[in-house]
Amino acid sequence: MALVNAKEMLTKAKEGHYAVGQFNINNLEWTKAILLTAQELNSPVILGVSEGAGKYMCGYKTVVGMVNGMLEELNITVPVALHLDHGSYEGAKACIAAGFSSIMFDGSHYPIEENVEKTKELVSICEEKGLSIEAEVGSIGGEEDGVIGAGECADPQECKMIADLGVTMLAAGIGNIHGKYPENWAGLSFETLDAVQQLTGKMPLVLHGGTGIPADMIKKAISLGVSKINVNTECQLAFAAATREYIEAGKDQQGKGFDPRKLLAPGFEAIKATVKEKMELFGSVGKA
Ligand code: 13P
C-alpha cells in the first residue's frame, strides 16, 4: 500500500480512544524494524523524520525512495504515514516537494502571530496536496536535533487559535520532555491537557517525548484526547544496549560475526520489541 496521510488513522484513533505511535527513523534497519512490526501487529504507524535524521540519510528524497521501496518489497498493507518531525518552514516545504505524506511545522518558538501566519500558509499547501499537518504550541522540553525547549505548558486559547486554522493534529506542551526524564520531573500536566481538549474538541492531540512516560500516564493522556504519541530515544537506547551486548560478548570476533547483517541484527530485534511494546500500550494493535 502506498503512503497515506495521517488524517484518517488519527480520526479513528481519537474516536476509538487509542493512539497511533510515531517512531522516528535513522536508517534502513530502523525503518524495516518499524514497518515489519506494524505489519505483524496489524497496526497503523507513522514514521517520523527529524531534519537532522533527514540530512543523515542523505536528504528527504532518499528517505522517500527508501520508504516507498520497502512498502512495496515488504508487502506492507497497513496504513503508513511518512512525517517530518519538528520541521522548520523551509524543511516543511522541502518534504512536501520530496513526497512525504505528512509534515509537522514547529512554529512554537515564534511569537504566536507568526506561528499562526506560517502555519496557515502551510495548511493551505497541505490541503491542496493531500498531506496532513501537525502544528505545535508551547515548546516541548529537552533537546532534539539542536531544538531546545524548556517544557512549558501550552496556553489552551492559543491551542484553539492554531487548531482552528485547519491543522490535522496538534502538539501541545504539557510538561513533556524529549529524551530521558530527569529524576525530579513533575509529570504531565493533565489539567492543561484537559483544558486543551475542551477547547479543541475532536482535534487529535499529539504527545511528544514518549520515551520513559509511565504506562498509567500514557493511558490517562489517551483518555484525555491524545491520539498520536512520539517515540524516538527509547528505540535508540534499545538498539545501543543490544549492540553493546553483542560486542561485549565478543560475537563480532566469532566466525563472520563482523558482517553488518549479523552485527546489526540484535539492535534491529530490540527496536522491533520496543515498537511492539509501545503499540500494545497505545492500543493500536489490530486497528489497521
Ligand atoms: P523521545 O525521544 O523522548 O521519545 O521523543 C520523541 C519525540 O517527541 C519526537 O518528536
Image: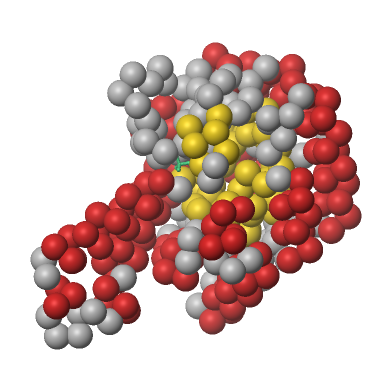
Q: Is residue 160 left or right of 29 when viewed as pictured?
A: right
Residue 45 image position (x, y, % from top left): 54, 56
203 relative to 84, above or below: above
Estimate the x, y position of residue 99 in percent, counting from the top left: 73, 66
- Residue 65 visible to the viewer: yes
Give above or below for 140 relative to 144: above
Relative to 49, is 171 above or below? above
Q: Can you say which quadrant of the picture contains the N terminus?
A: bottom right
Report the colour scheme: secondary structure
Residue 113 on image: x %, y %: 83, 25
Is 73 or 243 nearer to us in this picture?
243
Q: Residue furthest front?
A: 146
Kindly identify the residue that appears in the image at 68 percent across and 39 percent down: 106
Q: Residue at x 50, y 78 (%)?
A: 74
Q: Is residue 49 left or right of residue 110?
A: left
Circle count: 0
Residue 47 seen in this snapshot: no
Residue at image x 29%, y 56%? 240
Where residue 200 sits, quadrant-wise, is top right
Q: Residue at x 63, y 21 (%)?
A: 154
Tell me if 73 is positioned left or right of 285 in this view.
right
Image vertical order of residue 110 relative to residue 1, above or below: above
Front-most of residues 285 and 37: 37
Q: Position of residue 123 (x, y in %)?
A: 83, 44
Q: Quadrant of the C terminus?
A: bottom right
